[in-house]
Amino acid sequence: MAAIVSNARRTVGYLRAHPRQTKAIQLALIVATLGFCAWAVRNQWSKAAPLLENARPGYLALSLAAVAVYYLVFILGWIRILATWNIDVSYRVALQSEMVSMLAKYLPGGVWTPAARTYALRRYAGVTDTPVVLASILVEAGLSAISGVIVFVVSLAWVRGVNAPLLPLLAFALALALALHPRVFSPLAERLLRPFGAESIEPIPFTETMTLLVFYCGTWLIGGMAVYCMLLSLGTNVGLATIPFLGGVSAVGAIVAVIAVFAPSGLGAREASMYGLLLAVTTSGPALGVTLINRLAITIVEVVLFGAGVVSWRLNRAARASS
């Protein structure tokens, strides 16, 4: 770890001393990321196109809107986490940083997402407390994953015949809960983030943690609504009661995508897990169609929100310059 941090610091020093090379590298990373996004859209579109020929456009539009709402609401949780450590950022800045990190996940490897968000927050808001920002990302990911498992497990009370790896999921959620416990979180975060300059990171208060956990459960219900609309677009109505289960399926898919760091944005791994779980409420045709539409919708919404964030940042910078 020390060698990695030392090399990283030397690299940062070199890039600061050579701004032109830094701009070229930034441009190359943006092109590569957008290239991966374009490849993902093209790859999934070629598979989804036959299924979409008879799809209902109204429900497709609703599913895209629900995915967008999920992202736009999800950001509020991160803003609140940062606020507990006295880092106040505007919604616009948080949106830009989150979308930069969302696109960065299309680059293979798990380090690009937190690195991109930390860099974006430093650039857009001048936040230089890297250890705290990284800790906030870890807390956000942990609480989101735990809440997703909770929603999924609770939904099994009325959705039968689900072939899911419950024990690994519960063990994973329990491990995350233990890691977020105040007596464990502070020493663990300080040890992990010490190479980035961490000295003392206070845990989030228990009541705040519970509030965020409930909040993230709500975000997965929004994700379940998106999947429900995707099924409706293919002419399959599985009932409103399945929305929590569908949200849990989305959560499991997201967890698998994070674990599968070798695949850009978990491409393939996420779809396989969602397809297997959806067979509990529908047949193979709609299940396959929804997994493909879901990937397509996620990529399109992330690119659109990223573009909106960039335009907003440039307009705001131009307004400040003129004033």
Image (tube, rainbow, N blue to C red):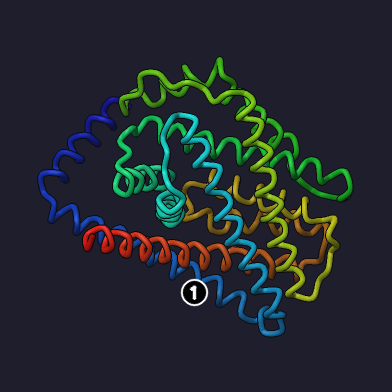
Residue at left 73%, top 39%? Answer: 150
Q: Residue 143: where, in percent of width, then height?
A: 60, 36
Q: Residue 232: where, in percent of width, then height?
A: 77, 71
Task: From the image, tell me which residue sits under label 1.
Answer: 42
Q: Is residue 261 above or below residue 130?
A: below
Q: Residue 6: where, in percent of width, then height?
A: 23, 30
Q: Residue 283: where, in percent of width, then height?
A: 81, 66
Outermost residue toward the front in this view: 323
Q: Locate residue 308: give its quadrant.
A: bottom left
What amino acid is found at the position of numbered circle 1 in the picture? Arg
Nearest the camera: 322 or 252? 322
Q: Is residue 123 above or below residue 64?
A: above
Evaluate whether residue 181 shows in this view: yes
Give the crowd class for mark 1: few <14, some 14-19, many >=20 residues within 10 Å. few
Q: Which quarter of the rendering shows the C terminus?
A: bottom left
Q: Which quarter of the rendering shows the N terminus?
A: top left
Residue at left 74%, top 55%? Answer: 246
Nearest the camera: 282 or 104? 104
Q: Secondary structure at mark 1?
A: helix
Residue at left 34%, top 34%? Answer: 130
Nearest the camera: 220 or 191? 220
Q: Is residue 17 above or below residue 42?
A: above
Residue at left 19%, top 57%? Answer: 23
Q: Is residue 4 left or right of residue 239?
A: left
Q: Locate residue 106: give its quadrant.
A: bottom left
Nearest the camera: 236 or 45? 236
Q: Is residue 2 left or right of residue 167?
A: left
Outermost residue toward the left in this view: 17
Number of numbered discs on residues: 1
Evaluate whether residue 106 shows in this view: no
Q: Is residue 158 above or below residue 147?
A: below
